[in-house]
Amino acid sequence: MLALLTKVGAMAKFSKITNGSRAAIVAATAVVAATNPLNATGLSALTRDSRIDIVRIGEGSKTLAPFASVVFCMQNNDQCVNTGGPSIMVLDKNRKSQLISVNKSVNHAIRPVNDKLGADVWSIGVTTGDCEDFALTKRKKLLQLGWSSESLRIAVATTSSGEGHAILIAKTSEGDLVLDNRFDAIKDWRKTDLRWVMAQTGTNPKYWAKVKANVAEPHLVSIGQTVSETAEINRSNAADKYQPHITVTFAYFQ
């Protein structure tokens, strides 16, 4: 049974090494980064030292889910179940390529069109849609590629201009990464203009939690798994003028 509680309108829209060896490894990494074709459209500013902690999005207290997400889960139950698998995906070369490809292809496959104010609908596999439709479609494609449901979470935030916005968070060994329909570049969640509000929980996509203070954890990824820093590329077409909006209605499962 769904109990409707309240309705809020909002404009949307990561052995011991001598100093000489370390220098050689750094130099070799730089050469690979410069020649790697994935760097042309990929992950932004994610080179990490194995001694540096990763800071992740924290899961706070449970909160009411956006009503449109409840309706979406009722109509697409396969997209709202825990499929098992790791909560953190190791971002190897293959997974990195998948993120880049899915983010870019979906960004250019869907024409950005806002839902009518007060009639928010969350959909997947559409040709036109707003921010949450982009995020849901990316999530579905990554699930089909073998990503675990716990590592992929839809989140709601506000932009620097105060507009509501929905994006996909991919929790990886290189940090919590943002797949945003406004940009082809994939960024660490702290390097965006977003102010975080809430996100799906890891154990059950039907339930949502507030985003709490940063959570640090030891960075244990080996040098071989280091992700190179890349140039940030923004979309530069007419869709950039698109100003998304979300009309958020909250509900809960009972």
Image (cartoon, helix red, strand yellow):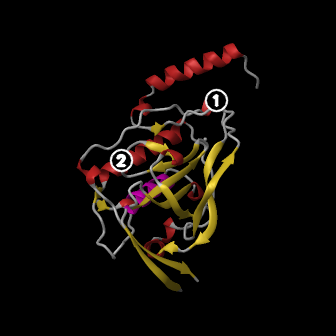
Query: Magenta part mainly helix, strand or loop?
Result: helix
Residue 190 forms part of the magenta stretch: no
Where does label 2 land, which residue?
105
Q: What stretch is highlighted in magenta?
A: 132-144
Q: Do the residues labelled 1 and 2 touch (CB within 8 Å)?
A: no
The answer, for residue 86, to whether it is visible in the render is no
Q: Which residue lies furthest to the top in this view?
A: 20
Q: Amino acid type of disc 2?
A: Ser
Q: Which of 79 and 173 is in front in this view?
A: 173
Q: Which residue lies furthest to the front in this view?
A: 161
Q: Which mark is residue 26?
A: none
Which mark is in front, 1 or 2? 1
Relative vertical location of residue 253 with respect to residue 44 in this rendering, above or below? below
Where does label 1 land, which residue?
223
At x 56%, y 80%, the residue is 253
Relative vertical location of residue 27 with respect to residue 51 in this rendering, above or below? above
Secondary structure found at label 1: helix
Number of on-image labels: 2
